[in-house]
Amino acid sequence: MPGAASGSTGAAPGPGAASAPVGTVPAPGPAGAPPAPGADAPAPVPTPLHDPDPYSTPPYGEPGPWAPAPPVQHPAATPAHGVAVSAAEAAPAAPAAPAVQDAPVVDPWARYDPWAAPASAPLQQADPVEEDVKRRRGRRRRVLITGALVIALVSGVAGGVVGVQLERNGGIGAVELPQTGVEAPDRDPDSVAGIAAQALPSVVTLHVSGGGSAGTGTGFVLDDRGHILTNDHVVEPAGEDGEITVTFHSGDTAEATVVGRDSGYDLAVVRVKGVRGLSPLPLGNSDNVQVGDPVVAIGAPFDLAGTVTSGIISARERPITAGGEKGDGSDVSYVDALQTDAPINPGNSGGPLLDGKGRVIGINSAIRSADGGLDPEDGQSGSIGLGFAIPINQGKRVAEELIESGKATHPVIGITLDMQYSGDGARVAAEGGDGGPAVSTGGPGAKAGIRSGDVITKVDGRPVHSGEELIVKTRAHRPGDKLELTLERDGKERTVSLVLGSSDGD
């Protein structure tokens, strides 16, 4: 360094000379350089920057190597933050050689700058680096949070779908519910299903049209010649030249013609031709029927062919009258009926009422409607559990007569009744409908001694409450049957016996 003389280390410092770190070898000058003036004099010792520590606290308690001042910013020498300094200023200053007395004292603050960066490296700012790290960490955190949310959402949806599948189907995959295997179609012959299976092939549906009217009813096969029994009010719309179509349970159809009909019994027989393989229904005995016996009704209510219903016998010998739309009484039917709660509706008319063994015990004919009327199902009122069937014993006799002659005979007493009488019993009218005597001359009633004004109160010991009921009780028998009548005359009761006569027509 110009103006500095080289010398050996350990020289005593001179007064007022700048101090140099003890034990530091001054940097030698360039090779071959001439010695500086005054090199023979000892180099002045630099003055310490602080007094010795009286408490001997290292490193200031004992003399030692020179150390820079504490890192306190020098206001005049410290450059502005972020301003690069030269390499000479940034590099650690070499220990100065002992200077001559006249050499200026080197300012130690110029040698040290705690804020200066090495000259070889450019200045860098720490804040952007920290921001980049924070951003990367933030992005990583956001990515992790977003991924976790997506995974949670997908898991929730998947779990919901699986839960719904498990709730609805009980598992994942194809739904297969437990089911009973195929069973034999055979049923107990005495069950409703067994009875229906046997009877349905013999039950038919009749579609009748003519004279501007049409209707639907039911019938059943009587024999293998094609005779079918049904109600008279079912075939009535056909008249003399109407059309009757019979539909079998198999779906086959055939044209039918009327063999005979009787409005008093509300029975008719039609016949189909050219049909083979007919299976007649077995006929039972209605006298054996008891209240509470199970029954099965088959028909086509509201044109629903092959409808099967079941119930019981609710009552026997229920006197009913039906019809009467013509006003002259020629279409009134008198039936000593079987009452059943098996549902019977319009279209069931003429269908069979079967007992527990599948035998016909009655012909479904009428229902009690909700408005209190008793009609042969010609209205549209539904069943209220009050159905009535013609006993098969009566139906069999009438059917046989209709097949043989086209007409049915009626058992008669040979008297004219006062149908306006409101008292208990059936009173004999004062005169006949044609103006003649009320008791036919030579008839069964006349032979038994019945007179005009007599009130008949019992038939075979069973009470009679009206004229209609007496007719029903009479028609429940065959011509030639013997009846025992209880009557009142002049306040006295007497009993007479008679044999029923026969009359064609109503």
Image: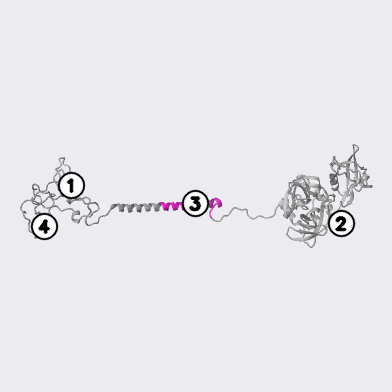
Mark 3 to mark 4 CA distance (whole Å)? 86 Å
Q: Position of residue 121 (x, y in %)?
A: 24, 56
Circles 1, 3 touching at the beta carbon (< 8 Å): no
Q: Position of residue 232 (x, y in %)?
A: 81, 53
Q: Position of residue 81 (x, y in %)?
A: 24, 51
Residue 159's label in the rendered image is: 3
Secondary structure, mark 3, is: helix
Looking at the picture, the colour scheme in use is one colour
Give the residue number, with chain letter if any, for mark 1: 69
Three-letter code for the amino acid on which mark 4 is drawn: Gly
Q: Residues within 10 Å of mark 1 (few under 14, many from 20)?
A: few
Give the residue number, with chain letter if any, for mark 2: 405
Mark 2 to mark 3 CA distance (whole Å)? 83 Å
Q: Residues within 10 Å of mark 2 (few under 14, many from 20)?
A: few
Circle 4 or circle 2, nearest the eye: 4
Give the magenta part as a residue range: 145-172
Mark 4 to mark 1 CA distance (whole Å)? 28 Å
